[in-house]
Image (cartoon, helix red, strand yellow):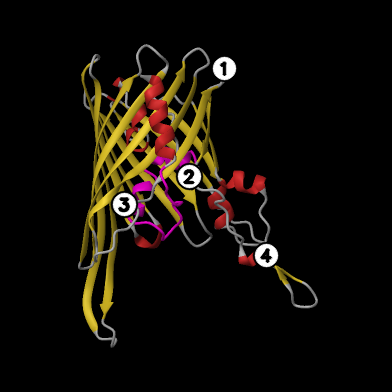
């Protein structure tokens, strides 16, 4: 069984798919950060196997019995007055059939002023998108490996244009309880549009991520390392602001080497008191830091920090993530234990 699943993952990785670079695919909201906890740890975490029911949205292999009857609602004040949020719930039928997971991701782009080709006002219009997901995970035999999948129905409305799509997420998780070490791979957004906006079929934001984490012995810290967008190499593009001109006016573009490419795939994070009622979370997203960095100015792009506080059956989470000097994001979350 394990060999068949690994072979399927290898086949999925070989499917021709371009990188998820902004503007090249549709339904980009599917890969937005899903919770304050993920945001605080750099933006993408695949290996949290605990109470965090929102984790099942990003890697379905992490769906587990600790999520039973947990309800989470998250909201993000995003860039440019865009607001988006997620909601998740999990229910364990019994320990034999494991746990089922349901989730919603929603984004509202706000109101826009419309004009025709002559500059005449056509009134205001809005844009919003949503995805409904159903997920399930199972242990592969009696091994330390777990396999999970999410099936997503996607709807999008942008002004007068509508689109409907379907997608599948696949996850494979390894848990070493002796070392308190987890490793996971997630293949996200394998799917297609059912109906298009205007007759043109567009690709979905296919993405492959790999992550590791470990709880340090005798120290209340769990570290996380994630390698994102592995389906795309190289991922970095030269920054025009880093170009150099000589006395003759010849311009030399920024050169990004092999190490620079690896760094831009990397996200690091750490969670202090991961099992406690009070958590402190820190993260750094190298690609965000490089792409949004202002030359000769320190603006801390890529950094994120957050906290979590548990009060009885409720857990509140908050994260602040740095993007640019002019725009940052705040993430708010509430999880309720309904047991």
Residue 300 visible somewhere in the drawing: no
Q: Position of residue 248 (x, y in %)?
A: 79, 78
State if disc 4 and disc 1 touch (CB < 8 Å). no
Residue 261 shows which numbered tag? none
Does the residue at mark 2 contact the one at mark 4 (Cβ under 8 Å)?
A: no
Q: Are marks 2 and 1 in contact (CB under 8 Å)?
A: no
Among the two numbered marks 2 and 3 on one chain, the one whose residue lies closer to the N terminus: 3
**Which disc number belongs to residue 231?**
2
Q: Is residue 266 visible?
A: yes
Mark toward the start of the polypeptide (3 vs 4): 3
> Magenta segment, which residues?
15-43
Q: Give neighbour class at mark 2: few <14, some 14-19, many 20+ (Cα, 10 Å).
A: many
The residue singled out by tag 4 in the image is 253
State the residue position of label 3.
84
Q: Secondary structure at mark 2?
A: loop
Which residue position holds label 1? 217
Image position of 23 (left or right of 95):
right
In three-dimensional space, the C-alpha distance between marks 2 and 3, rounded to whole angstroms, equals 26 Å
Instruction: List x then y, in percent, for residue 96.
Output: 24, 14
147 or 13, nearer to the observer: 13
């Amino acid at each position: 069984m394990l060999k068949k699943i690994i072979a399927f993952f290898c086949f999925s990785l070989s499917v021709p798919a371009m990188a998820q670079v902004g503007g090249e695919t549709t339904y980009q909201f599917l890969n937005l950060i899903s919770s304050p906890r993920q945001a605080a740890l750099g933006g993408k975490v695949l290996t949290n196997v605990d109470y965090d029911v929102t984790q099942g949205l990003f890697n379905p292999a992490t769906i587990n019995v600790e999520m039973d009857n947990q309800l989470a609602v998250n909201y993000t004040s995003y860039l440019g007055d865009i607001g988006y949020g997620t909601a998740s719930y999990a229910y364990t039928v019994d320990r034999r059939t494991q746990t089922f997971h349901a989730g919603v991701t929603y984004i509202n782009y706000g109101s826009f002023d419309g004009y025709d080709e002559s500059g005449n006002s056509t009134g205001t219009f809005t844009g919003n998108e949503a995805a409904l997901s159903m997920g399930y995970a199972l242990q592969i035999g009696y091994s330390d490996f777990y396999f999970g999948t999410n099936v997503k129905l996607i709807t999008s409305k942008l002004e007068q244009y509508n689109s409907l799509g379907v997608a599948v997420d696949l996850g494979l998780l390894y848990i070493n309880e002796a070392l308190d070490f987890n490793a996971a791979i997630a293949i996200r957004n394998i799917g297609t549009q059912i109906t298009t906006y205007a007759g043109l079929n567009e690709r979905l934001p296919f993405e492959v991520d790999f992550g590791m984490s470990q709880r340090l012995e005798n120290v209340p810290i769990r570290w996380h390392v994630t390698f994102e967008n592995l389906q795309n190499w190289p991922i970095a593009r030269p920054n025009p602001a880093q170009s150099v001109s000589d006395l003759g006016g010849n311009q030399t573009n920024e050169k990004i080497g092999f190490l620079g490419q690896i760094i831009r795939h990397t996200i690091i994070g750490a969670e202090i008191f991961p099992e406690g009622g009070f958590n402190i979370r820190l993260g750094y997203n190298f690609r965000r830091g490089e792409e949004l960095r202002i030359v000769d100015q320190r603006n801390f792009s890529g950094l994120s920090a957050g906290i979590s506080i548990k009060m009885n059956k409720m857990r509140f989470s908050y994260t602040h993530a740095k993007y640019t000097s002019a725009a940052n994001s705040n993430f708010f979350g509430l999880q309720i234990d309904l047991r």
